[in-house]
Amino acid sequence: MTFTWLWVVFFFHGMTPGFWFPALTNILRAQGLDGWVAIAFAVPPFCSLISPLIGGALADQRVTANRLFAWSSLLGAVALGLAFWCLDQRMHPYWFVSLLAVYSIISGPAWGLLATIALTHLVHGERQFPLVRLGATIGWIGAGLTTSWVLKADTSPISGYAATVSKILAGLAAFCLPHTPPLGKATSWKSLLGLDAFSLLRQRDHLVFFLVTALFSVPLNAFYMYAPELLGVLGDRKPTATMTIAQISEIIGMLLVGFVMARFRIKVLLLWALGLSALRYGLSAQAGASGVMGWHIAGIALHGVCYTFYFITAQVFLDRRVDPALKGQAQGLLTLVSGGLGPLAGAFVCGYLRKLLVGEDGSGWMEFWGVLAGMIAVCFVIFAVFYRGLAREVRENRV
């Protein structure tokens, strides 16, 4: 039953952003709020600078992780529903942004908490974790298809209401997750705030890993911000549904990653993910140059495999290499850099590049995606040169 309930919670938790996140740019543009796109996409990562480490510290030291996830999901659902209600009522955008910030602070630790719960209780964590995480991918796909084909809400706040319902269901299902007590103990105010996680950066490989993850997350943000827009420019009238192709390919990645992880070094998997990510944006650049939507769709399809091979491998990497008393905080630090620092910078960097390179006539998309591909290539080089990895005998002992 543990596997089943984890899968159900991941399903509804993944469905929540699948409803509103890919549609957000088009929703704001439909209401004449083009200037608020970058701000709206900057709010969640900015708030992720605040809460993931604290949430991880609470799970490590004071509160059962499963209850913390459940209550934060229910409270987050209230904030998310109010945010889209304000947008639906055409109130000043500050109301939407402010409530989105509240939602993001409450929900910031969620992915890290779920990873901690799953990797604690699954008997064969490295093989089974990708399979339960697959529930979130299927949930995202279901949400995207429902948004476009059932709710017809690619440009409507209705998608936010649907996300609120799925968030509530995730919170309720989480009460059935296994008891996951804290394994550590707070020894100072730094421990209480989750700042002990930064001690991981004293180790060279951890430093390189977190640095590259933060840098990689900068151009990655453009996928969510502007891939749906380019689909619209190229003539797609159901961009939210088309974006689910990424999650379909993510399913393939989830089914493969456990098999591949058992046979190759962590470094190899992460380099594959970075290299394929650069190629992915290269395909979108070709779509911008040729005007052929197929190139962009191919890039979208590659996204799921890239995302899985990098971030699922990253979560397992931390579970292998970090002391049990710090695992929640380590996952929180991963959320901070991949969902906070990187996307926060990405919201403004990608927004600036969009304004600088893409013209009103639809030109410049090749340059836009090409620059982002180059940024990912730099991440590849940094990781290839500076990450060392464990010796084989040490890796086998850790596993």
Image (cartoon, helix red, strand yellow):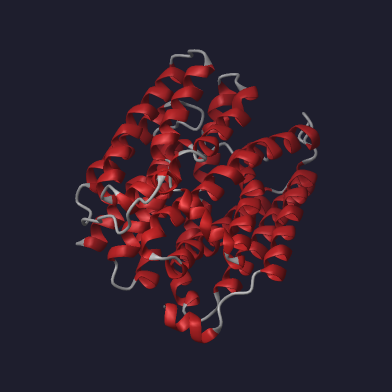
> Where does the N terminus fall, quadrant-wise?
bottom left
**Left or right placement of residue 383 versus residue 243 in this view:** right
State whether residue 99 is above or below residue 50: above
Residue 192: in sight, yes or no?
A: yes
Across and down, in percent, residue 4 comes to 24, 60
Which is more toward the observer, 395 or 73?
A: 395
Which is more toward the observer, 393 or 151?
A: 393
Across and down, in percent, residue 18 comes to 44, 43
Residue 142: in sight, yes or no?
A: no
Across and down, in percent, residue 158 comes to 41, 27
Picture residue at 55% right of the left edge, 40% below the top: 239
Across and down, in percent, residue 341 comes to 59, 44
Picture residue at 71% right of the left edge, 49% below the top: 292
Furthest toward the front, the residue is 188
**Left or right placement of residue 164 versus residue 210 in this view:** left
Which is more toward the observer, 47 or 327?
A: 327
State whether residue 224 is above or below residue 85: below
Picture residue at 77% right of the left edge, 49% below the top: 371
State whether residue 277 is above or below residue 24: below
Which quarter of the figure has residue 144? top left
Which quarter of the figure has residue 79? top left
**Left or right placement of residue 344 versus residue 91 in this view:** right
Q: How many labels does the image show?
A: 0
State whether residue 291 is above or below residue 229: below
Furthest toward the bottom, the residue is 393
Picture residue at 44% right of the left edge, 65% below the top: 322
> Where does the C terminus fall, quadrant-wise?
bottom left
